[in-house]
Image (cartoon, rainbow, N blue to C red):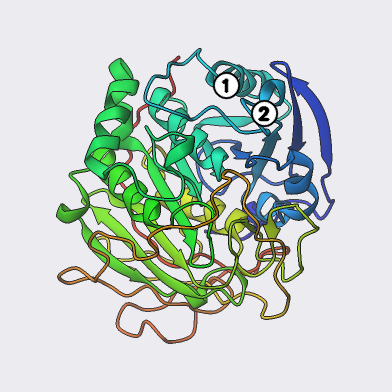
């Protein structure tokens, strides 16, 4: 597709602080439109305990992704100061569309959708959360799967757990999937038209990194036929956007395409939002500039793998769901920010060896990086990118393209 739709005008958008559904919300509106669907995408970014939305606004490195991919970024402060220490109320297995913090967040989404100037496509609404915000993102994705087409969990515990369960895995993917399906209720068919990202860093000693694989397994179970039944494809972590990202990644695909990305970082991010900016975050900001640029990665991943819209193809298409494309690696400079914990008084950490099938499946394609987000031929996955778009403000393109089936399920409240 043409690069023109991605770049938009050369004018730079800016942040605005708004009051929506009783919450203070930092909103960034790009001049560009999404390369898929109609209008702009919307991504909610949920902070962690003791963190403020302002930290993600100023240090989260969200603007470049918003501009490059036509995404409205909405970063709310937790309503009422949170349950304790600014935490989102993800705890336990009892949630509804109106309970806890769910009602205000869904009302906020409605307010943003009603703003005609934002031109938000209801099929492109995503929620990505860090720490307790990651727990809340899972709750929202399960109670309102008709609203959210994509969910991202960064250093977050699994659905159904409590505050005492942070440092050690206290549930299974199967148990969490059962909770999710129960929360979805009549909206459960929409779970099968979602995509998900899970991320943890090996230096996180606050939330057990073992939850990363559990989260991926839960999403695979409710979105598809379970992680064991899906094709596992290795992600070339170093080719992902950011500041020298390192780690092991696996994309899990079914007949409709990639549904879940499991990212195990070794960049030393710790318990922090990975901005990939190459610059250290401020003291107690819980933002780290090392490694993956989560904002850019999530924006590109959801545009490529959202089953509710035609898949974004930045420079070419594969055949039969094979991988054709990869982005260039990000910047290699920078130092780490704060990696202290926010959700637990027990910093003992947890199991750093994710469980689950993370190896390449039969006939799996290794996802590698090209240049400038271009297309890499399937027969030469390490060759130079061809026909790609170099997008101002982008730190590289996420790896991998899969053609997805347009299922046509629309948002219903």
Circle 1: element type: loop
Q: Is residue 155 left or right of residue 338?
A: left
Give how far across and how far down residue 373 sits, in percent. Answer: 54, 70
Q: Is residue 312 visible?
A: no
Q: Is residue 265 visible?
A: yes
Q: Are marks 1 and 2 in contact (CB under 8 Å)?
A: yes
**Mark earlier in primary sequence (1, 2):** 2
Residue at left 53%, top 61%?
A: 204
Give how far across and how far down residue 305 sits, in percent. Answer: 40, 50
**Residue to which mark 1 is pinned:** 101
Quadrant of the image containing the C terminus:
top left
Instruction: Report the front residue among 133 and 344.
Output: 344
Instruction: Report the front residue among 321 and 285.
Output: 285
Instruction: Report the front residue among 57 and 161.
Output: 161
Q: Is residue 401 left or right of residue 45?
A: left
Give how far across and how far down residue 36 sits, in percent. Answer: 51, 45
**Residue to which mark 2 is pinned:** 78
Circle 2: element type: loop
278 over 251 or under it: above or below: below
Task: Measure how far apart labels 1 and 2 are at the Cα level.
Answer: 8 Å
Residue at left 33%, top 43%?
A: 170
């Amino acid at each position: 597709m043409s690069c023109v739709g991605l770049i938009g005008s050369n004018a730079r958008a800016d942040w605005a602080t708004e009051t929506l559904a009783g919450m203070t919300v930092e909103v960034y509106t790009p001049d560009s439109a999404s390369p898929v669907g109609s209008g702009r995408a919307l991504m909610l970014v949920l902070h962690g305990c003791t963190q403020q939305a302002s930290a993600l606004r100023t240090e989260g490195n969200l603007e470049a992704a918003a501009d490059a991919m036509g995404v409205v970024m909405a970063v709310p402060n937790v309503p009422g100061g949170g349950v304790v220490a600014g935490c989102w109320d993800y705890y336990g297995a009892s949630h509804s569309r109106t309970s806890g913090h769910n009602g205000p967040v869904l009302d906020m989404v409605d307010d943003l959708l009603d703003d005609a100037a934002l031109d938000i496509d209801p099929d492109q609404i995503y929620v990505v959360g860090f720490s307790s915000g990651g727990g809340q993102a899972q709750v929202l994705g399960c109670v309102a799967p008709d609203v959210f087409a994509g969910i991202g969990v960064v250093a977050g515990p699994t659905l159904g757990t409590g505050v005492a369960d942070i440092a050690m895995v206290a549930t299974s993917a199967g148990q969490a999937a059962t909770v999710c399906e129960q929360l979805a209720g009549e909206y459960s068919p929409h779970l099968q038209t979602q995509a998900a990202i899970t991320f943890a860093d090996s230096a996180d000693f606050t939330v057990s990194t073992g939850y990363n694989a559990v989260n991926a397994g839960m999403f695979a179970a409710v979105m598809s036929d379970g992680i064991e039944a899906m094709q596992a494809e290795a992600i070339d972590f170093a080719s992902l956007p950011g500041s020298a990202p390192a780690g092991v990644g696996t994309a899990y695909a079914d007949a409709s395409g990639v549904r879940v990305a499991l990212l195990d970082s070794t960049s030393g991010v710790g318990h922090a939002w990975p901005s990939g900016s190459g610059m250290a975050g401020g003291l107690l900001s819980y933002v780290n500039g090392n490694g993956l640029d989560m904002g850019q990665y999530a924006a590109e991943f959801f545009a490529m793998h959202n089953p509710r819209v035609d898949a974004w193809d930045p420079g070419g298409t594969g055949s039969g769901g094979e991988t054709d494309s990869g982005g260039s690696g990000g910047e290699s400079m920078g130092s780490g920010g704060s990696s202290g914990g926010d959700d637990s008084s027990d910093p003992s950490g947890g199991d750093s060896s994710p469980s689950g099938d993370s190896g390449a499946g039969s006939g799996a394609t290794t996802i590698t990086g090209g240049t400038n987000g271009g297309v890499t031929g399937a027969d030469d996955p390490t060759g130079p990118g061809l026909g790609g778009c170099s997008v101002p403000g982008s730190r590289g393109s996420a790896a991998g393209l899969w053609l997805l089936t347009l299922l046509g399920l629309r948002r219903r409240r």
